[in-house]
Structure formats: C-alpha cells, structure tokens
Image (cartoon, rainbow, N blue to C red):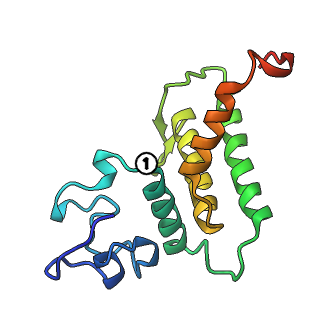
Amino acid sequence: MTNYAEDVDACDACRDGNHVECTDLDECGCEFMGDERHGISIMEVGMTIQELQEMAYAVAKAKGFHSSGEPNIWKFLGNLHSEVSEAWEEARKADFDPKKAYYSEGGKPEGLPAELADIMIRCADTAETFGINLEAAIREKMKYNYTRSFRHGNKRA
C-alpha cells in the first residue's frame, strides 16, 4: 500500500499505508479509492489480492458493515451465498449474455460481471475480517487442484 507524504491530504492511517483503519474513505485525500488528485490509484492499475482484501474491508467498514461487535461467520457466508444467487439469477434471464454489463437507473453496475465482482469483494472482505491470507490459500488450493485427476469423482460439472 502507498505511504503518503505529510503534504498529501490523507488521514493518519492512510498516510501510514493502513487503509483498513481509514477514518473516512469518502473524505480522505488518499488514492485508495481512485482519488486522482494525487496521481494514479490502485483502482486504475490493479491490485494484489491482499490489497483487494484491505480495500473490501475498508469500504465495508466505512459503510457501516463492521460496526456490530464480533464478526459472525454465518452472516458473512450468507452474504457471500446471496451474491452467488444473484449471479445465478442473472444467468436465468432470457437475454443472458455473460459479458453484458448494464446499469440500473441509479448507475449501479448490473449483470454477471458485476455479480462476479460482488462475489470477489464479499470473499475478500470475509478473508480480511477473519485474518485469512487469501492469496496464500488460493495458491495452495490451485497447487493441489493441479494434482487431481481429470474430472475427479467422475463429475460432469
């Protein structure tokens, strides 16, 4: 994460590169959410999985989703499941196109790409909340999956 000089209009947490503890993402002058006042942001050039985790958590926290005491894994998994269900509902539409993105009246991105993004965001937030190194877990699981037999368990999908 970026560390900011004293002259950048960012909160102390962001200035130290700790966006998870940002006091107000909407008002902070850091580049974390794509503020172009200070140059290119990670929103434009990509990010690591760890940065995605930190960003997902910070945004959820700033929007009030981490304010009710101890995190409840069941709530997190339920929310993740709801995003998968929304992707499924997109696929059921008569005019479904997996690459099609469209926007609701308020400008909200819709379609399978947006729902897959929501799944990744919820997953990253969950991992950050519970202290899981998602990048390491993905690498480990992909390494194992490479050793599995073709359609292991004789599965069709």
Image quadrant holding the N terminus, namely bottom left
Residue closer to the observer: 151 or 35:
151
Residue closer to the observer: 91 or 127:
127
Q: Secondary structure at mark 1?
A: loop
Residue at 21% over, 79% down: 9
4 horizontally vs 19: left or right: left
Residue at 41% over, 77% down: 22
Residue 15 sits in quarter: bottom left
Task: Identify whether 12 is placed above or below 64.
Answer: below
Task: Check disc 1 and report the residue beneath it.
Answer: 107
Residue type at mark 1?
A: Gly
Where residue 60 appears, as percent x and y from the top left, is 54, 67
Where residue 135 appears, as percent x and y from the top left, is 54, 49
Residue at 62% over, 48% down: 137
Image quadrant holding the C terminus, namely top right
Toward the left, the furthest residue is 7
Where residue 16 appears, as percent x and y from the top left, is 31, 78
Task: Identify whether 126 is placed above or below 85.
Answer: below
80 horizontally vs 63: left or right: right
Residue 27 sits in quarter: bottom left
